[in-house]
Amino acid sequence: MPETLRQLTSLDAQFLALESPRQTGHVGGLAIVDQTTAPEGRFDAETVKALLRERLPLLPPFRWRLAEVPLGLDYPYWVDDTDFDLDFHVRELALPAPGSDAQLAEQVARIASRPLDRARPLWELYVIHGLESGHTAMLTKIHHAVIDGMSGAEIMGLLLDLSADGRELPPAAANGAAREGAGRPTELEMLGRGLLGLPRYPMRLLRALPTALPNADEVPAIFGAIPGARRFGRAAQALRGRRSPALVAPRTTFNGRLSPHRRFAFGQLELEAVKDAKNRHGCTVNDVVVSMCAGAVRRWLLEHDELPDEPLVAQIPVSVRTDEQIGTFGNRIMLMSAPLFCDEPDPVARLQLTHDAMGDMKERHKALPADLLQDANHFIPPAVFSRAARLTFRLATSGATRPAWNLVISNVPGPQFPLYCAGARLVANHPVSVITDGMGLNITVMSYCGRLDFGIVADRDQMPDVDRLMAWLGEELDAL
């Protein structure tokens, strides 16, 4: 059995389980680079492949391939792909003239709609030429089972440099490259591993009970599909003398069943303007960003005559990765819930409500165990994990229950100094994230070099005009 087998956690496996012919589990980023700073003014697929060949020893996930356990008896494993083909993963294309932002967004949406090939390492990279600005785009796709926001930032940190001249690379980790002759484990070997793992399931469940069940309301997407789990959770909370606030999401157009196709919108806003607003109103940058998103989504709901009388509920991912877990990749996150005050028409009052709600969310987060999401997944046996995930999403769109969340809002702080990729200066880095049945809108923003880079993903049928949100975000910032 190869020594390089590495088992996915229950949380990593959840991102595999959510995939269907209509929804994908990968995330990525749309980087815009200025190739005039690169050697010979060139940035193309060959340039990127040369960079990757140099740095692959530092990027073990780029060579990991999925190995499923027969019959789904246990969570899958990552194995080193000894037939790794860099040419398959790095691709190149050009936009037709004039190469507008709208054309680029449409191309990104089409690429993001396609699932990754599970027979190969779960990532792709596209170099896109022909942009009207004269810059070049680099679109990355990597499965969420491999990385979360923080580990994704670690990977980008290994590909980006502080100057156009590059840098001296640190030594690769001991497990950085595929072990010579490791090979892919046989079905019989994987079945043996699965059978050996069967006794571990009840032990995982018993260990998870004390922390996960009393916090059932904080993981509604999982416990909502287990009859009686949330009722028992509330009883456990009552015994402990505390009760988490019940956030109930109203139903909107973007909380239905997804189509297989996506829309993507992107844009930039000045970070200094956001800081001015937060200083003026005595809050945080994150409060301003979330409140701006609430205002933009409110406008969309008003335009479509479906503004609820109550706040929406936003899913806000929070990293729980410790310093000791840096470099371990995979997922170390908590999915928190917060009210999104689209029902409040006054932008300043909305910001104050948001500030108070985000403060409450931070206090709840401090009280929760870091492994809550992973522990909650242990309530579902690995053999029925995928079927349970499909049931959860079916319930979210059936109309029989309310959705757990209406949308995702994520604000990722980034470096405030220029970065370079193969000598080309990074101009912007727009996130491209994931949506699911019951939650067809994702607004993710990353700060970089004095700007906020927004990436907005929506279902193509539910929100064909999602690009309007970007203009409204700017107007909401002006209003503050």
Image: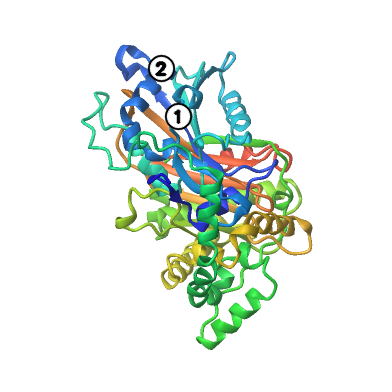
Drawn side of residue 344 relative to residue 413, left or right: right
Residue 126 can be seen in this image: no
Asked if residue 404 is positioned above or below residue 277 in the image, the reply reads below
Q: Position of residue 410 (x, y in %)?
A: 50, 50
Q: Position of residue 344 (x, y in %)?
A: 62, 60
- The colour scheme applied to this rendered structure is rainbow
Q: Could you tell me which residue is drawn at 23 percent across and 33 percent down?
A: 169
Q: Nearer the viewer, residue 39 or 207?
A: 207
Q: Which amino acid, by three-letter code, is at mark 2?
A: Glu
Give the secondary structure at mark 2: helix
Give the secondary structure at mark 1: loop
Q: Earlier in the sequence, mark 1 or mark 2?
A: 2
Q: Could you tell me which residue is drawn at 64 percent across and 36 percent down?
A: 263
Q: Position of residue 163 (x, y in %)?
A: 25, 28
Q: Which residue is mark 1?
A: 84
Asked if residue 237 is positioned above or below residue 95 in the image, the reply reads below
